[in-house]
Amino acid sequence: MLYRIIFRLILSRLDPEFAHHLGMFAVRAASSVRLTKLLPRKNFKKISVMGLDFNGPFGLAAGFDKNAIAIRALGELGFSHVEVGTVTAIAQPGNPKPRLFRLKKDRALINRMGFNNDGADVIAERLRQLRKTKAKLPIIGVNIGKSKIVPIDQAEADYRTSAKLLAPYADYLAVNVSSPNTPGLRALQETKALKPILQAVINEAQGKPVLVKIAPDLLDEDILQICKLAKDLGLAGVIATNTTIGRDNLATDKQTVTKSGDGGLSGAPLNERSLAVLSLIRKNFGKDLVVISVGGVETHQQVSQRISAGADLVQGYTGFVYFGPLWARKLN
């Protein structure tokens, strides 16, 4: 309740990207002075997925900790796993600002960040140093994407570079071909283009689980084709789903939505489609693939619903913005 008041009176008035950086600073500072250690201990249900032991089913989706700078702190806040990135082989500043927008009436965000990150070599070294500390950490996933300056026909080598650098320090790798904010990226979801990329990542993964992250805007038959490819190649599973380019059935007035411009929509409006994609995958593939379900999850009832529908793990991001630092602990 206190956070909701602070958000309404202060944070919601700040530029969204500045507020994000402010929040990251606060989370890291609280951890560095051990304030997060004062939170009441919770006995989360431990679960085993992909041969990894998770302290609860609910984790943080990629996009929040792009540069792997707050993993320990986020784990202390209750996330069972933290998926960092999206990381690209070549460091890049992302798209011009402003590039992050709130749709408060919908508890949603629109972002066109454009994979802004420090690059795979820098982030790999950061993860290496973190592992050396022997600190208690959540499960670490690393989400990798295509560098913007790399042509589509050279995407395989670009993903291979990132996987080779990052696999030694990741618990699992996620292949992102579904962000709407890198030109041409979503074309890589076509199975002919996707197959060599996934194979390259598997070859460099050092036995770590590999998943592919898919868009909610794909036709059902295309989702099933990607899942079949994932199964045939021996991937651990899929992450369903990324942000959507759709703008249907929003409570926010059309003028505000239009003014926000292009980008991926995340948050509560994705709940229905994300749940439908999860059910589609489970109906057609049973337990042959791990499914990490993400999109529109806000409450512990929704987490339970996703698990009942067949999700092995559940992730969120936008809810962290709207519900505050204790959100993950409540959901787990």
Image (tube, rainbow, N blue to C red):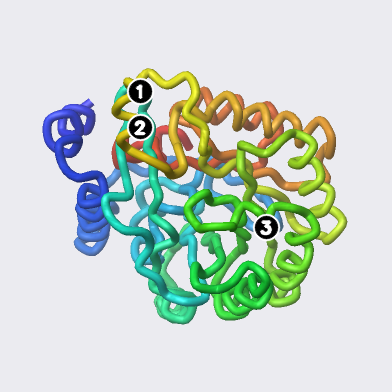
Asked if residue 180 lies left or right of residue 167, the reply is left
Q: Which mark is residue 188?
A: 3
Q: Residue furthest right?
A: 232
Q: Secondary structure at mark 1?
A: helix
Residue 147 screen position, x and y as percent: 51, 70
What's the residue at 83%, 61% (across, down)? Answer: 233
Badge 3: few (under 14), some or many (20 or more) residues near its Cα, within 10 Å? many
Quarter of the rendering containing residue 201: bottom right
* Mark 3 in CB contact with mark 2 (< 8 angstroms): no
Q: CA distance from mark 2 to mark 1?
A: 6 Å
Residue 212 screen position, x and y as percent: 67, 54
Residue 286 screen position, x and y as percent: 83, 37
Residue 65 screen position, x and y as percent: 39, 58
Q: CA distance from mark 1 to mark 3?
A: 31 Å
| Amino acid tagged 3 | Leu
Front residue of 325 and 322? 322
Residue named by callout 1: 254
Relative to residue 146, is residue 120 depicted above or below? below
Quarter of the rendering containing residue 160: bottom right
What's the residue at 46%, 48% (across, down)? Answer: 60
* Mark 2 in CB contact with mark 1 (< 8 angstroms): yes
| Amino acid tagged 2 | Thr
Q: Which mark is residue 258?
A: 2
What's the residue at 32%, 46% (across, down)? Answer: 100
Q: CA distance from mark 3 to mark 2?
A: 27 Å
